[in-house]
Image (cartoon, helix red, strand yellow):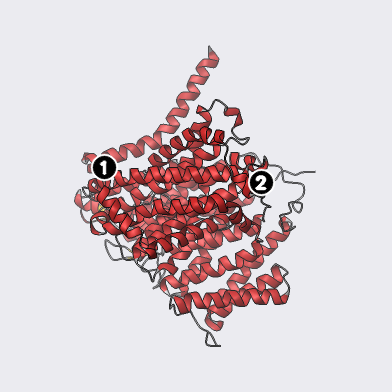
């Protein structure tokens, strides 16, 4: 482990990589702050800018955008009650209340400290767990890969924060979109309508840019801008009591975030909600939650940062994204000509460990930058949206063109921008759709290979120990919550009867 | 006085998704659901995913129809944002941005990418955001120049050119 970390440090600490890491976290913070942009959008539209640098440098920068934007999202949650990221939704509950009580700085400071502590813990856990996980994943054949993807899709749907049925429908749409193009098994063109551009399938970076960037811009135009609360430099000082109250919340939030983040398809949004719920349940001052409790900021912010880092375990070791942003990063990895999966650890150790160590370095930079400069970043919230959205649109469309030098990509962004706007309008979750598009092709490949391996009898999957364990976990996730609800209702009815 | 009316948007959306799922499922069969020795064929996944999408969408549609209708807000123009725009004005801007984007993409083969998007920024700034012409021109020129320098010069990407040659 020490050797790996040293190799990672040697890679991540080169002047070039440090500079790109700094650029990534600063851009990430700005992207997380600005309405209409989030980590998925930021990563997607900036991929073209990284095409000329080394893959490890590019990934360090894109990962910096990922966790940098989470902090930016926290600033808008606290000052505007408008989360820049889904994972920061729960931070609005107490963060905004703290801001209204004149404690915006303290909320931002504890979020930065909590995120940093979570990053430190999750890096150590990542370094310890990722290699054995990758070694274990080397034993996976098509049936096991198929079972992992079933688990990822089920997790994505069950752990989504809104309607599960909507999430399931969107995952199906994602898989159907992935079916467009030449079938890998037979070479037959499906749903291409005679278009040459569709033969190689729908490119998901363009889909993501359309859904997240253009769709979000259109949505923001419709809902209008809000006025932020001002954060002052002098408010950033934390009281000793704040730190004492937050320590346990940060530790528990980081643990929950890391555990949930390791699940393929889990993302970091649910981790933040669970951490908040647990903190509220454990607190002696539960009535303070929702009215400016500092633990209500510390716990979810630690959880979403730990989950964001832990998301890289399934992404790098299995090639299965943890959430929407890691799905886009997975796309970037393939754009750079790399194959995500367990072999990445043995074939590209400098890249993997350099990337993992860069999480820590990036979080140090974020802490150093954000503790004193949060109010300065917050000034960006005062830029009228009318200046921002034309630039976001230009960057999105030109960035999409730059990926394949093809105007078809630009039209795809337009079409998916409209779809993204419609999805926002009708509260349809985007993450299941994106994950469906990303793993749809892999899912079908594993399905076809498993079918060939098991002589056309997929029931034989149940004779494969690893696959059956993963499928049982998926079944438990599917059946568990409704069964628990039913049991609780019955007990409640019995109690009322007595 | 408020009136009770069911929003047709979700009904159209879920019906459309159900039809989309059904269309994928139906057209998947000719691709071959199972091939030799009962192995999975190219039509299997679209059939399953399409059927599931149709079922989920119908369930969502049924849920929507069972949901009691909400009273319609008495006024829709009062919800003003930070820029002082009402909901009606914002919807109008949205429709115009959508139209302008479409026109911009249609103009790319004729005017080139830099000029088309530069014009998009100019039109949005003057027509929709009501900025003064010099300010809008400056913003438009800066965006087009940055776009050209970043993509065409720095990243060496051959952006589509038009009649003016850039």
Q: Secondary structure at mark 1?
A: helix
Direction bottom: furthest residue: B164
Per the image, label 2 sits on a secondary structure element best described as loop
Q: Chain of mark 2?
A: B
**Residue A377 sits above or below residue A245 on the image:** below
Q: Are marks 1 and 2 in contact (CB under 8 Å)?
A: no
Q: Quadrant of the N terminus of chain B?
A: top right
Q: Residue at x 72, y 70 (%)?
A: B131
Quarter of the image for residue A327 reads: bottom left
Coordinates of residue A36 in the picture (x, y in percent) = 57, 58
Near-viewer residue (A400 or A300)? A300
Image label count: 2
Query: At 56% from the left edge and 88% from the top edge, which residue is drawn?
Result: B164
Frontmost residue, A123 versus A239? A239
In the image: residue A116, left or right of residue A375: left
- Compared to residue A403, the image places residue A63 above or below, namely above
Numbered mark located on residue B6 in the image? 2
Q: Position of residue A383 (x, y in %)?
A: 65, 61
Q: Residue at x 57, y 54 (%)?
A: A373
Mark 1 highlights which residue?
A467
Which mark, residue A257? none
Q: Residues within 10 Å of mark 1 (few under 14, many from 20)?
A: many
Q: Residues within 10 Å of mark 2 (few under 14, many from 20)?
A: some
Q: Quadrant of residue A215?
A: bottom right
Q: Provide the chain ID for the residue under circle 1.
A: A
The residue lying furthest to the top in this view is A498
A260 relative to B71 in the view: left or right: left
Marks 1 and 2 sit apart, C-alpha to C-alpha, by 46 Å
Locate residue A407, reporting x and y percent: 47, 74
Query: Residue at image x 71%, y 71%?
Result: B127
Side of A472 relative to A346 (left or right):
right
């Amino acid at each position: 482990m020490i050797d790996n970390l040293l190799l990672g440090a040697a890679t991540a600490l080169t002047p070039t990589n440090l500079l790109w890491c700094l650029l990534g976290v600063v851009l990430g913070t700005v992207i997380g702050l600005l309405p209409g942009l989030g980590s998925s959008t930021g990563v997607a539209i900036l991929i073209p800018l990284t095409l000329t640098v080394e893959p490890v440098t590019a990934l360090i920068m894109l990962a910096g955008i990922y966790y940098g934007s989470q902090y930016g999202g926290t600033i808008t949650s606290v000052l505007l009650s408008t989360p820049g990221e889904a994972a920061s939704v729960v931070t609005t509950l107490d963060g905004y209340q703290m801001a209204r009580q004149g404690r915006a700085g303290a909320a931002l400071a504890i979020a930065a400290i909590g995120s940093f502590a979570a990053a430190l813990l999750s890096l150590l856990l990542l370094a310890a767990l990722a290699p054995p996980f990758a070694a274990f994943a080397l034993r996976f054949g098509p049936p096991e890969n198929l079972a992992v993807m079933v688990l990822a899709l089920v997790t994505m749907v069950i752990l989504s924060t809104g309607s599960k049925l909507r999430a399931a429908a969107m995952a199906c749409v994602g898989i159907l979109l992935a079916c467009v193009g030449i079938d890998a098994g037979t070479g037959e063109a499906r749903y291409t309508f005679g278009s040459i551009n569709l033969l190689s399938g729908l490119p998901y970076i363009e889909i993501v840019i359309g859904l997240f960037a253009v769709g979000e811009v259109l949505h923001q135009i419709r809902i209008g801008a809000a006025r932020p609360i001002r954060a002052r430099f002098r408010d950033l000082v934390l009281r000793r009591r704040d730190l004492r109250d937050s320590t346990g919340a940060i530790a528990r939030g980081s643990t929950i975030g890391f555990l949930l983040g390791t699940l393929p398809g889990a993302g970091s949004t649910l981790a933040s909600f669970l951490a908040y719920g647990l903190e509220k349940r454990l607190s002696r001052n539960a009535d303070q939650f929702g009215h400016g409790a500092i633990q209500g900021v510390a716990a979810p912010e630690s959880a979403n940062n730990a989950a964001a880092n832990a998301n890289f375990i399934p992404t790098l070791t299995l090639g299965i994204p943890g959430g929407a942003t890691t799905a886009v990063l997975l796309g970037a990895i393939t754009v750079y000509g790399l194959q995500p999966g367990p072999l990445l650890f043995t074939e590209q150790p400098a890249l993997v460990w350099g990337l993992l160590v860069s999480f820590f370095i990036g979080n140090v930079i974020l802490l150093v930058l954000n503790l004193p400069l949060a109010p300065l970043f917050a000034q960006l919230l005062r830029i009228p949206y009318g200046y921002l959205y034309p630039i976001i649109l230009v960057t999105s469309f030109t960035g999409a063109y730059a990926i394949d030098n093809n105007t078809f990509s630009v039209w795809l962004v337009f079409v998916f921008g409209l779809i993204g706007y419609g999805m926002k309008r009708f509260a349809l979750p985007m993450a299941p759709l994106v994950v469906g598009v990303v793993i749809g092709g892999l899912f079908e490949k594993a399905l076809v290979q498993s079918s060939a391996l098991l002589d056309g009898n997929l029931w034989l999957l149940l004779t494969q120990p690893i696959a059956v364990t993963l499928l049982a976990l998926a079944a438990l996730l599917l059946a568990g919550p409704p069964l628990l609800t039913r049991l609780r209702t019955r007990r409640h009815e019995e109690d009322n009867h007595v | 006085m408020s009136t009770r009316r069911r929003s047709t948007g979700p009904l159209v959306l879920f019906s459309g998704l159900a039809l989309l799922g059904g269309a994928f499922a139906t057209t998947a069969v000719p691709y071959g659901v199972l091939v030799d020795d009962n192995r999975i064929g190219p039509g299997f996944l679209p059939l399953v995913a399409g059927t599931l999408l149709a079922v989920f969408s119908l369930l969502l549609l049924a849920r929507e129809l069972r949901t009691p209708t909400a009273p319609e807000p008495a006024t829709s123009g009062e919800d003003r944002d930070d820029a002082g725009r009402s909901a009606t004005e914002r919807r109008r801007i949205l429709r115009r941005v959508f139209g302008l984007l479409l026109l911009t993409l249609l103009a790319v083969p004729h005017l080139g990418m830099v000029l088309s998007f530069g014009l998009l920024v100019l039109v949005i700034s003057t027509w929709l955001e009501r900025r003064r012409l010099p300010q809008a021109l400056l913003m438009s020129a800066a965006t087009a120049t940055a776009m050209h320098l970043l993509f065409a010069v720095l990243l060496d990407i051959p952006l589509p050119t038009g009649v003016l040659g850039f």
